[in-house]
Amino acid sequence: MREPRPPKKSESLEIRIPYAAKTAFMARCQREGRSASEALRAFIDQQIETPPRRLKRWRIAAGALMAAAVGAVAVPSLARPGPAADPAQDLLRRVAFAQLDANHDGVLSLDEYRRR
């Protein structure tokens, strides 16, 4: 009894890639002793046969919870100023700001900045 024939290769697929990628791919195929068509057909067959990897919902939920927890801890610490490395420098900054802040509202306006 004769073996069944493989399906006829009647379809083509055109892709656009950079010249350097094509040259490197063709050189590798030549080193491996196969045509570019054979290499691409093998890759396509592998992609069809291999089921897609899916992340389980609990992993996604756990990651989201961890990110939220880290954010909850980090955001408040970013909102308030940290301790000055040098108290003398901190005092100089405060004095300089007080001199610029003419109406002493704790906010430096554009007019106050221009007057300096």
Image (cartoon, rainbow, N blue to C red):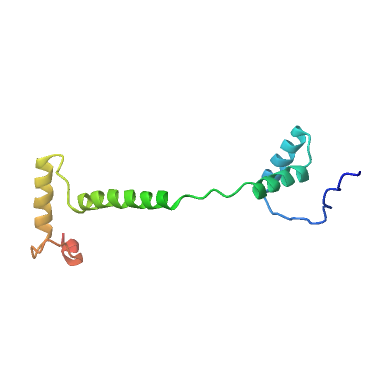
> Is 79 placed left or right of 61 in the picture?
left
Where does residue 45 sit, x and y in percent of width and height?
70, 47
Q: Is residue 82 left or right of residue 60?
A: left
Q: Is residue 63 left or right of residue 79?
A: right
Question: Considering the image in quadrants, where does the C terminus appear?
Answer: bottom left
Q: Total of numbered circles in the picture?
A: 0
Which is nearer the eye, 33 or 24?
33
User: In the orientation shown, which residue stands out farthest toward the right?
Assistant: 1
Would residue 72 be seen by someone viewing this image from the given angle? yes
* Viewer-side residue, 52 vs 81: 52
Residue 5: x percent and y percent?
86, 48
- The residue shown at (10%, 51%) is 94
Is residue 109 positioned above or below 10 on the image?
A: below
Quarter containing the N terminus? top right
Q: Classify residue 81 as left or right of residue 36.
A: left
Residue at left offset 12%, top offset 45%: 90
Residue most toward the top?
31
Q: Position of residue 86 (x, y in %)?
A: 13, 39
Image coordinates for residue 82, horizontal then vertical, percent? 17, 46
Instruction: Answer with the quarter of the image where residue 99 lies.
Output: bottom left
- In the displayed structure, would residue 68 be above or below residue 109? above
Residue shown at the point (33%, 51%) measured from the top left:
65
Single out the residue that lies furthest toward the front: 1
The residue drawn where x is 48% and y is 49% is 55
